[in-house]
Image (tube, rainbow, N blue to C red):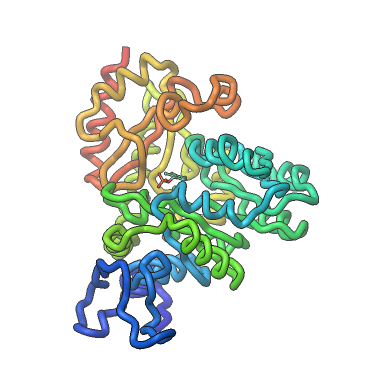
Amino acid sequence: MDYQGFSTKAIHAGQEPDELTGAVNVPVYLTSTYQQQEIGKNKGWEYARLDNPTRSALEESLAKLEGGTSGHVFGSGMAAIAALCTMMKAGDHVVCSENIYGGTARLFDKIFVHYGLTFTYVDAGDPAKVEAAITPATRLVHIESPTNPMMSIVDIAAVAEVAHRHGVELSIDNTFLSPYLQRPIELGADIVMHSTTKFLNGHSDGLGGVLIGTKPEHKERFEFVQKCTGGILAPFDCYLVLRGIKTLALRMRQHDTNGRVVAEFLSKHPKVKQVFYPGLPSHAGHAIAVRQQKGFGSMMSFELGSKEAANAFVRSLKLCYLAESLGGVETLVSHSASMTHAAMTQEQRDALGITDGLIRLSVGCEDVEDILADLEQALAGIE
Ligand SMILES: *Cc1c(COP(=O)(O)O)cnc(C)c1O
């Protein structure tokens, strides 16, 4: 059955009661193989690298939530991006937004360049720059919006229009907002990718990644990649993401509400030099974010002016954890320059504004008063 409302879809799409028992949760099918009836005859399941019912349920759920036609889950977000790259062959070119997830740039520049792919990084905030970078060899434009950690906004519909005019597909990493807050396929994207590790799973207890396609050739290609390279998500981890998705709408509403309050608080705090959050009217991408997102979410970064100030702040935190990752129910704080973007050179970080005083925040679902109190006492400790 096709449901209309997002919350209903999140709870039911792909997650119908088990046919055998009526169990309302999708069973975790811990099996590597399936008994076959006779030569060439089976119940549609042959071997767990190809398919598993728990995984199929998750893939259907994710495809429906993003408005795509097929979903394909992998062992991590990076495994999903690696699978995306196997759409291409030596000689193909990718245009990529410049302040992309650090691991994605590392995968492109340190691994896939050795297989004959080439990558050009541009400020995708200006669709004309994306267009100028497209060559006859370009096969894919890959972007994020908002970007990590500067929270710059890319006009997804404008970039999709440019890419399609040149016969190029657009893929977007939608990890920072989840399909509750942004659905890129509705804006023209061809492929959506997520690290399900973050908001989709939502509880900081498992890794995963997904590619969502919109065309029969995506389904054919990504299923083939799952079968050939084997980097699939295991059944129990699929179950964790399915369970996380059931409360996605509830969690995202809380993340969004808390995010707005925290951004407002930080923007008025004397120890904070600048806040990067698309929900603030002062943010350069605010108008586009209002148009293409259903909310602003809970990801933001802010400038404390120096590494000493940043370190004094994170050392004093009690409720919020200094940790890699994001999108969990707990508030997580990270220092981009030494954590997610440590692999970049100082010049690369400077060019993107990732200073030693920059703190990234993934605001959780705690009571916002408690989050504010912790931030306030930690900020007070800065000299
Ligand atoms: C975490 C993350 C990834 C990588 O996902 P893993 O699950 O850690 O492999 C990719 N893109 C973005 C935006 C992320 O936040």
Residue 280, x across and y down, in percent: 48, 41
Residue 125, x across and y down, in percent: 64, 42
- Judge whether residue 122 can be spotted in this image: no
> Could you tell me which residue is drawn at 41 percent across and 85 percent down?
39
Total labels: the figure holds 0
> Could you tell me which residue is drawn at 21 percent across and 83 percent down?
22
Q: Quadrant of residue 353?
A: top right
Residue 327, x across and y down, in percent: 35, 47
Q: Is 252 or 271 nearer to us in this picture?
A: 252
Residue 76, x across and y down, in percent: 40, 50
- Whether residue 245 is situated above or below residue 112 in the rendered picture: below
Q: Where does the C terminus fall, quadrant-wise?
A: top left
Q: Is residue 145 left or right of residue 373?
A: right
> Could you tell me which residue is drawn at 55 percent across and 47 percent down?
144
> Could you tell me which residue is drawn at 38 percent across and 84 percent down?
42
Q: Is residue 195 left or right of residue 104?
A: left
Which residue ends up furthest to the top in the rendered image? Answer: 383
Q: Is 159 or 77 nearer to us in this picture?
A: 77
Q: Is 88 or 208 nearer to us in this picture?
A: 88
Q: Where does the N terminus fall, quadrant-wise?
A: bottom left
- Judge whether residue 356 can be spotted in this image: yes
Quadrant where ligand 1 appears: top left
Which residue ends up furthest to the right in the rendered image? Answer: 136
